[in-house]
Image (cartoon, rainbow, N blue to C red):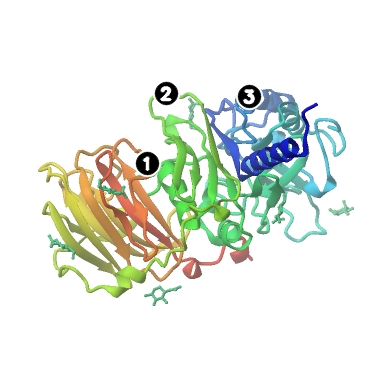
Amino acid sequence: MGCSPTHFSAIVFILSVLKAYASDSYIAAVYEHSVILSEETNLPVSPEDALELMNKNMDVLEIAVKAAAQQGAHIIVTPEDGIYGWVFTRETIYPYLEDVPDPQVNWIPCTDPERFGPAPVQKRLSCMARSNSIYVVANIGDKKPCNSSDPKCPEDGRYQYNTDVVFDSEGKLVARYHKYNLFITETYFNYPEPEYVTFNTSFGNFGVFTCADILFHDPAVVLASKLQVDTVLFPTAWGNTLPLLSAIQFHSAWAMGMRVNFLSANTRNSSVDMTGSGIYGPNGPIAYHYNTETENGQLLIAQLNSRPHLSPTYPPAVNWSSYATSIKHFSPTDQDFTAVIYYDLFTFMELTKIEGNHTVCQKDLCCHLSYRMAEKQEDEVYVLGAFDGLHIVEGEYYLQICTLLKCKSTDLKTCGQPVATAQTRFEAFSLSGTFDTSYVFPEVLLSGVQLAPGEFQILSDGRLISQNGTSKPVLTVALFGRWYEKDPPHPQQASP
Ligand SMILES: *[C@@H]1O[C@H](CO)[C@@H](O)[C@H](O)[C@H]1NC(C)=O
Ligand SMILES: *[C@@H]1O[C@H](CO)[C@@H](O)[C@H](O)[C@H]1NC(C)=O
Ligand SMILES: *[C@@H]1O[C@H](CO)[C@@H](O)[C@H](O)[C@H]1NC(C)=O
Ligand SMILES: *[C@@H]1O[C@H](CO)[C@@H](O)[C@H](O)[C@H]1NC(C)=O
Ligand SMILES: *[C@@H]1O[C@H](CO)[C@@H](O)[C@H](O)[C@H]1NC(C)=O
Ligand SMILES: *[C@@H]1O[C@H](CO)[C@@H](O)[C@H](O)[C@H]1NC(C)=O
């Protein structure tokens, strides 16, 4: 036997290096799912028919779960509404709901399915996780009976919640999150009390929230900054809204602004403009998918840091106003005009030259831009814009935004309207603003609705810069600021 102590310690050393390496990173998967919708969402269906539809969707999700596990993924995120779809009433969603217990009960639905009454969906998701040894994140509906002993109990005697569930690699329910910031169309769900749902694993500390939650302080910002999760799990059904709020653009920007990993799984449906899923890190996108060609689903898999804040490449904290408040305003701003981005009236100025330094202000916010185009195209107009105000359509939230964008046409009235392609290349740009908030999300979106990983930088003085230009023409460059202190009360708190 050649097992001398020297050899032995060498082996131990190699093993411990491998182990340290393994626990520093993990493999994540997200699945963009083209949801099979019910043909009938105006009339209630039987529980059997509801389960049949959900099984059709879970058949597809199961194939993705298996494929992800075979490629070594530790966790897979599937989309919001990915199992039963959308556009229900309180009554017609009911057959799709299951009572989801508090994870503290320590339950593996796969091995003990009837413990809390019928739970075929939780059982199937739990078995998917268990038989493939992978964490599975899914979005389902939770129902909680109530009665007149509870003054807030809805008339139909139950609460209904849009709910994310997480099953660990043994099939145990480890997280249950009730969506707090419902979208205006989700009248069939109730607002819960705010919940801050996290769970810990050998590959990092995780937090969960969903879709419109990303626009608000609770629970999203609390998870990322106070509870310091390493990775956010984000099932979503996100309709793309250019020029500032397409899925890949905003979700990757949030990950950079908050300096967390972010696993976003969107649904795919062209008639409601839903596509765009990704695996994003604090330094930018790692993998993403944006598809307007087909109605197909798509699996994305990538490796990322388990604990990004311990990594040598973790970006430093940013003071978003430091540079902008330290310089003199560039040009006089008598050429300003106003135009609308998604119901908000921005102040704009046109970039008429091939290069320049400009400032545009609205209320307290001044935005500075230095830029150099490769060439000035006659048929394309770019503008610098500022917005400082309360957005009030489809949710109320206070914004401070600086943006460079391509107008839809050469008519300045169209500035801010959605446009997906461009021809103008920028050789360099630097954008900054006098923000009153420390929550700013940096966006760079290129022609064809593509991201620009590695092609721009965030300086710790708050400048978003590209020194060498981007690989494709520019659609939007933005510093998307959220001033949460100025938000009106959450509807749940505001209701009588
Ligand atoms: C009302 O609900 C509470 C808790 O949910 C339960 O303990 C109680 O038995 C219920 N009362 C009636 C009359 O159903
Ligand atoms: C998570 O678990 C790790 C060990 O696996 C531990 O070092 C860390 O403190 C835990 N984090 C939290 C937030 O519980
Ligand atoms: C997409 O969603 C719309 C609206 O809910 C629906 O009418 C349509 O059938 C869906 N498309 C597909 C391919 O499922
Ligand atoms: C950011 O920088 C500005 C200007 O240098 C300074 O006044 C402000 O205190 C800084 N903010 C923080 C949070 O450090
Ligand atoms: C913009 O400002 C930079 C740095 O101050 C300067 O080098 C450049 O010449 C200016 N460009 C124009 C067109 O004024
Ligand atoms: C920009 O290009 C120069 C010259 O090729 C190079 O030295 C520099 O590292 C590049 N900067 C970035 C941020 O890629």
Q: Residues within 10 Å of mark 2 (few under 14, many from 20)?
A: few
**Residue named by callout 1:** 451
Q: Secondary structure at mark 2?
A: loop
Q: Secondary structure at mark 3?
A: helix
For marks 3 and 2 on the same chain, the one whose residue lies earlier in the sequence: 3
Q: Secondary structure at mark 1?
A: loop
135 on left or right of 300: right
Residue 176 x/y as whole percent = 71, 46
For marks 1 and 3 on the same chain, the one whose residue lies earlier in the sequence: 3
Q: Are marks 1 and 2 in contact (CB under 8 Å)?
A: no
Residue 121 x/y as whole percent = 73, 31
Residue 43 visible somewhere in the drawing: yes
**Residue named by callout 3:** 70
Q: Nearer the viewer, residue 306 or 330?
A: 306
Q: Quadrant of ligand 4?
A: bottom left
Q: Nearer the viewer, residue 454 or 118?
A: 454
Residue at (51, 53) in percent of width and height: 312
For label 1, being within 8 Å of ligand 6 is answered no
Total count of labels: 3
Residue at (37, 60) in percent of width and height: 459
In the image, residue 30 above or below residue 252: above
From mark 3 to mark 2, how far is it between C-alphas? 25 Å
**Residue named by callout 2:** 294
Which circle, 3 or 2, is nearer the viewer? Answer: 3
Give the residue type that dot 2 points to: Thr
